[in-house]
Image (cartoon, rainbow, N blue to C red):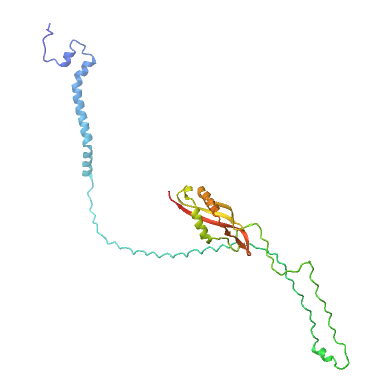
Amino acid sequence: MANENVYDPNLTLDEIVFKNRNKEYGAYDLRHQYPKLLTKSFIVGTALFLIAALSPFIYLTIKRLTAPPKQEVKAELVDILQEDKVLEQPKEEEPPPPPPPPKEEEKIEVIQNVVPEPVKAPKIETPPPPISKQLETTTGLVAQEGVKAPAYTPPPPPPSTGTKASTAEVKPQVTNDVYESVDQAADFSSGGINGFRSKFMDNFDSSSVEGEGTLGTEITFVVERDGTLSQIKASGSNSDMNREAERTVKSIKTKWIPGKVNGQPVRSRFRFPVKMNFEG
């Protein structure tokens, strides 16, 4: 009987581990074959890696060896003729469009009631007889019957109305309507429109207007026959400026010279545009 405590140097690690165990079990066989499998796997993996790494170089070498010989082509420079530049013809300038026709102002026909002037009826004169008739008449001491003249009939007298006929021109009655167009436009009595504009700028309170930049409005009012103003209305984009413009016009108490139609003062509408620059 062999002594189990004696160490055998020829034993491998696997035989030592699986001593007195079932070596027919798969683990012993795997551990026994592991070094061989590891070496074989290393060699195969290294070979595949080298093949994959060297395959591009092998492909290029084969392609270079099998490539056909290069053909040399002689390239000679050829002078290129420059084409003449095409000169563009100047475009004819189009004539400017004709100006629009002037806008004719609507004329207001004024019908006047004029009393016709009486005309005297013309006198009815009997022409003298012809020469042949005058030669047939005999002259002598005996009175002869001559050609009778037609009886004169005076013109009928004009109808009596109890008053004497007047030949003075009758002026048309002036209505209370507001005229948009007049023969003589209304004007400010103190310096004309420039004087009115100066008074407007002096009385205008810009601090009551909120806004920046250029603001504008149009003030319309009616100049009455006595020179006072009515129907004052300002129409613009800024309500503050409209309100202050109406107040300023109402504050100017100087009267206007009313407009006239056929020499008579009438009520006429006047438009007064205003533009101001407000800084923020």
Residue 57 in view, yes or no? yes
Q: Is residue 241 above or below residue 17?
A: below
| Quadrant housing residue 256 | bottom right
Viewer-nearest residue: 259 or 227: 227
**Which residue is painted at 19% across and 28% down in the image?**
43
Viewer-nearest residue: 63 or 15: 15
Viewer-nearest residue: 89 or 258: 258
Residue pushed farthest top?
1
Q: Position of residue 210 (x, y in %)?
A: 47, 47
Q: Position of residue 18 (x, y in %)?
A: 19, 13
Could you tell whether 151 is left or right of 115 in the image? right
| Quadrant housing residue 23 | top left
Q: Quadrant of the N terminus?
A: top left
Residue pushed farthest right?
142
Viewer-nearest residue: 138 or 118: 118
**Which residue is painted at 47% across and 50% down in the image?**
206
Residue pushed farthest front?
253
| Quadrant housing residue 111 | bottom right
Residue 274 in view, yes or no? no
Residue pushed farthest bottom?
140
Could you tell whether 49 is left or right of 188 in the image? left
Q: How many marks?
A: 0
Q: Is residue 108 above or below residue 138?
A: above
**Which residue is painted at 22% across and 41% down in the image?**
60
Could you tell whether 244 is left or right of 73 in the image? right
Q: Position of residue 130 (x, y in %)?
A: 80, 87
